[in-house]
Image (spheres, rainbow, N blue to C red):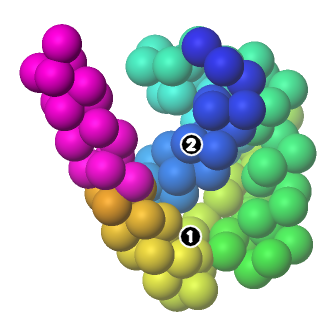
Amino acid sequence: MDVQFKKGVLKLCVLVLLDKQDRYGYELVQKISNQIEISEGSVYPLLRRLTKEEYFTTYLQESSEGPSRKYYRLTDKGREYLQELLQEWKDFSSGVNQLIKDGVTSD
């Protein structure tokens, strides 16, 4: 799949997952990787940027499996941004699906 296409949708995936529950970075990578092939290195810069833009807060939590983990929590600003992105995605995917449908039936 095209790298730029994945980068565009990765932000939406991260926000959707954090809307359900707080997660740590590697957990996000694993959840997304179960559905979309991504590199681990693509998620962490995005997490830093979205935290800086105040869409997430972070906190450390002890882990029984090693060092403390940094968890990400969606803020109210992040939830508002998620709703905007979801609407944009619905509009975009609907338009693309219509073009595909029209293209396939016009042959």
Position of the C terminus, as image quadrant, is top left
Q: Position of residue 21 (x, y in %)?
A: 43, 56
Q: Position of residue 43 (x, y in %)?
A: 75, 37
Relative to 20, 55 lies left or right: right
The residue closer to the viewer here, 83 or 100, is 100
Position of the N terminus, as image quadrant, is top right
Instruction: Name the residue: 68% across, 70% down.
Output: 56
Q: Which residues are magenta?
A: 92-107
**CA–CA distance between discs 2 and 1?**
17 Å
Residue 97 vertical position relative to residue 23 in the rendered view, above or below? above
Instruction: Name the residue: 31% across, 57% down.
Output: 90
Which numbered disc flags the more N-terminal residue, 2 or 1? 2
Residue 58 vertical position relative to residue 70 in the rendered view, above or below? below
* Residue 99 is a magenta residue: yes
* Residue 53 is a magenta residue: no
Residue bearing mark 1? 74
The residue closer to the viewer here, 43 or 94, is 94
Which-is-in-front pick, marks 2 and 1? 2
Residue bearing mark 2? 9
Residue type beneath disc 1: Leu
Residue type beneath disc 2: Val
Please report contact status of discs 2 and 1: CB closer than 8 Å, yes or no.
Answer: no
Q: Position of residue 94 (x, y in %)?
A: 26, 50
Residue 82 vertical position relative to residue 100 in the rendered view, above or below? below
